[in-house]
Image: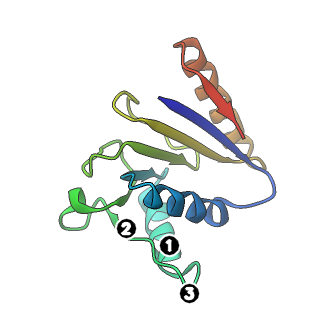
Amino acid sequence: MDILFYHLTETRVEDALPALLERSIERNWRVTVQTASAERRDLLDGHLWTYRPDSFLPHGLDTDPFPGMQPILLTAGGENPNGASVRFVIDGAEPPALSGYERVVFMFDGHDAAQVEGARAQWKRLKGEGHTLSYW
C-alpha cells in the first residue's frame, strides 16, 4: 500500500484535489474522498461540479442512491461502498482501517495547526505500524 501525505502550504485542498482525482480516474481507480464533516462533504460536492468549466469529474455522495456505482465517492464516514482502492483523507478526518486500499492520501492544510498535528499523529502511528510513507 502507498501512503502519501500532502502538506498544503501554497494551495487549498479545493485547488489540489481535483487534479489528483482526474489522474485517478484516468488510471481507472475507484476513489473515496473522506471529509471531516457532512457539511464539508457537501461543499466539496458543489465545488467538484464547478471547479473548471471544461472538465467533468464523475462523483456522488455516500447519501445518494447507489453509492456503490460511483467512481468517486464523497463521504464523511469510514465506509467504502464503492469498493475504492484509493482513499483521500482530507481536513483532518479520522480514517477507517486502511487495509484493502492500494493507496491512501492524507491532504492537510499547513496553515491549520490542528490539521498539521493530526497529520503528524497519523504519520507516527502508520510509521510505527511499519508502513512506508511519502511526504509531499
Above or below: residue 121 compared with residue 14: above
The residue drawn where x is 80% and y is 52% is 9
At horizontal 58% and vertical 12% (from top left) the residue drawn is 128
The quarter in which the C terminus is drawn is top right
In this rendering, which labeled residue sits more in front, label 1 or label 3? Answer: 3
Label 2: which residue? 59
Which circle's residue, 1 or 3, is located before the other in the chain? 1
Residue 95 is left or right of residue 68, and the answer is right
What's the amino acid at mark 1?
A: Leu
Q: Position of residue 53 (x, y in %)?
A: 56, 87
- Residue 125 drawn at (x, y percent): 57, 19
Vertical placement of 104 versus 10: above or below?
above
State the residue at coordinates (63%, 34%).
118
The answer to which of 52 and 64 lies nearer the viewer is 52
**Numbered disc 1: secondary structure:** helix
Disc 3 marks a residue whose amino acid type is Pro
The residue lying at 76 percent from left, 47 percent from top is: 110
Residue pushed farthest bottom?
53
Quote the CA–CA distance across marks 3 and 2. Answer: 16 Å
The circle drawn on residue 53 is 3
C-alpha gap between disc 2 and disc 1? 8 Å
Measured in 3D between alpha carbons, the distance from the residue under mark 1 to the one under mark 3, in whole angstroms, is: 10 Å
Element carrying mark 3: loop
- Few, some or many residues within 10 Å of mark 3 (<14, 14–19, 20+): few
What kind of element bears circle 2?
Answer: loop
Q: Are marks 1 and 3 in contact (CB under 8 Å)?
A: no
Q: Are marks 2 and 1 in contact (CB under 8 Å)?
A: yes
